[in-house]
Image (cartoon, rainbow, N blue to C red):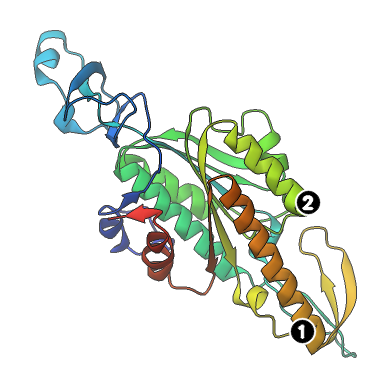
């Protein structure tokens, strides 16, 4: 399928079609899909008719009604319902910035430079892959990019015919500005309207720390979401190799600080990062949500079918 462009390799899509999202809860949707509903019946038990919409499974199309009325209807079954999948991609400035340093002219200090291409690329590739899985399963998909608000979003889509819109949306997305997941979700209309599965792709550099995370997850819990946090960090953020007297600049607030980076300082950073990652994981575990960390330099196939499949979040 064209439209994947540089985001996903062409051979990737048929492989994704053999997998689906592993939602823990049974769902009751409004359209025919590939998932078990709370309203259980016998296998393929007929429930109702509804008007045909582009992307529906043509095998459910009722040609008898069409020949009599000229209107397209599909058959709906009680034990096959859809899942509403919502994807939020962090597009704040930190997603496009890595930890790096270069000597300033005439001195020994340095400054942070943007090198976050791998982090931003992998986050969008993962979002595109999860979104395409949802579309291939006839699930309802909605996607948004956020910083302190929703910078851009697409309305609900269904069916593989909508994949080009998904890919184009992610390809054109850009990073910039300060980020706040809680602030973005608090904007009226930002939350999913139906219970379902929500995926968040971010580096989770939350200014409000644990308090902000609790607030954001509480907002999602209130709408009946099964939440997955995908933590994408660059190798330089996981294992910084900086040293010397540097000026580090916050990529979002553009404020700087002079720092003498020694081995002890880097060890303290690694301990704090480990504590922070543990906090993210623990908060999710407390609420029955999922958390995974994926280094930005990990190959896409390993991230999808190693980390995510190994965590039981996707299955084939």
In the rendered view, would you say 284 is above or below 302? Answer: above
Residue 110 horizontal/vertical position (percent) = 83, 82
N-terminal-most mark, 2 or 1: 1
Q: Residue furthest top?
A: 69
Q: Which residue is mark 1?
A: 102
Q: Is residue 265 left or right of residue 122?
A: right
Examine the image and state in which quarter residue 61 appears: top left
What kind of element bears circle 2?
A: loop
* Residue nearer the viewer, 236 or 155: 236
Examine the image and state in which quarter residue 58 appears: top left
Residue 90 horizontal/vertical position (percent) = 62, 52
Q: Residue sitting at 75 percent across and 82 percent down? A: 267
Residue 213 horizontal/vertical position (percent) = 69, 48
Q: Residue sitting at 36 percent across and 23 percent down? A: 30
In the rendered view, would you say 181 is above or below 139? Answer: below
Dot label at residue 55: none
Dot 1 crowding, Cα within 10 Å, few <14, some 14–19, many 20+? some
Q: Is residue 26 left or right of residue 293?
A: left
* Residue nearer the viewer, 316 or 157: 316
What kind of element bears circle 1?
A: strand
Q: Residue sitting at 81 percent across and 82 percent down? A: 265
Residue 134 horizontal/vertical position (percent) = 36, 44
Distance of mark 2 from mark 1, alpha carbons?
A: 29 Å
Q: Is residue 29 left or right of residue 182?
A: left
Please indicate, yes or no, whether residue 231 appears anywhere in the rendered image: yes
Dot 2 crowding, Cα within 10 Å, few <14, some 14–19, many 20+? few
Dot label at residue 208: 2
Quadrant (top left, top right, bottom left, bottom right) of the C terminus:
bottom left
In the rendered view, would you say 311 is above or below 78? Answer: below
Q: Which numbered disc, 2 or 1, marks the residue closer to the eye?
A: 2
Please indicate, yes or no, whether residue 55 appears anywhere in the rendered image: no
């Amino acid at each position: 399928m064209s439209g994947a462009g540089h985001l996903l390799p062409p051979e990737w899509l048929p492989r994704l079609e053999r997998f689906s999202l592993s939602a823990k809860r049974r769902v009751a949707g409004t359209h025919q899909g590939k998932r078990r509903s709370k309203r259980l019946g016998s296998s393929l038990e007929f429930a109702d008719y509804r008007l045909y919409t582009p992307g529906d499974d043509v095998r459910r199309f009722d040609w008898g009604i069409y020949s009599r009325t000229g209107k397209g209807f599909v058959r709906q079954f009680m034990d096959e319902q859809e899942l509403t999948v919502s994807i939020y991609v962090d597009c704040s400035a930190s997603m496009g910035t890595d930890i790096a340093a270069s000597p300033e002219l005439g001195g020994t200090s340095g400054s942070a430079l943007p090198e976050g291409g791998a982090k931003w690329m992998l986050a969008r590739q993962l979002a595109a892959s999860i979104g395409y899985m949802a579309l291939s399963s006839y699930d309802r998909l909605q996607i948004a990019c956020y910083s302190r608000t929703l910078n851009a979003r697409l309305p609900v889509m269904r069916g593989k015919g909508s994949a080009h819109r998904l890919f184009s949306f992610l390809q054109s997305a850009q990073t910039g500005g300060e980020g706040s997941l809680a602030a973005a979700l608090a904007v009226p209309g930002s939350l999913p309207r139906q219970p379902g599965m929500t995926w968040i792709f971010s580096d989770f550099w939350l200014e409000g720390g644990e308090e902000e995370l609790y607030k954001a997850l509480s907002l999602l819990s209130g709408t009946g979401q099964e939440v997955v946090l995908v933590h994408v960090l660059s190798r330089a953020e996981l294992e910084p190799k900086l040293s010397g007297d540097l000026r580090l600049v916050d990529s979002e607030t553009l404020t700087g600080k002079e720092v003498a980076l020694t081995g002890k300082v880097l060890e303290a950073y690694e301990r704090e990062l480990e504590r922070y990652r543990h906090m993210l994981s623990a908060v999710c575990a407390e609420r029955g949500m999922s958390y995974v960390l994926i280094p930005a330099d990990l190959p896409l196939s390993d991230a999808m079918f190693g980390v995510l499949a190994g965590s039981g979040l996707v299955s084939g």
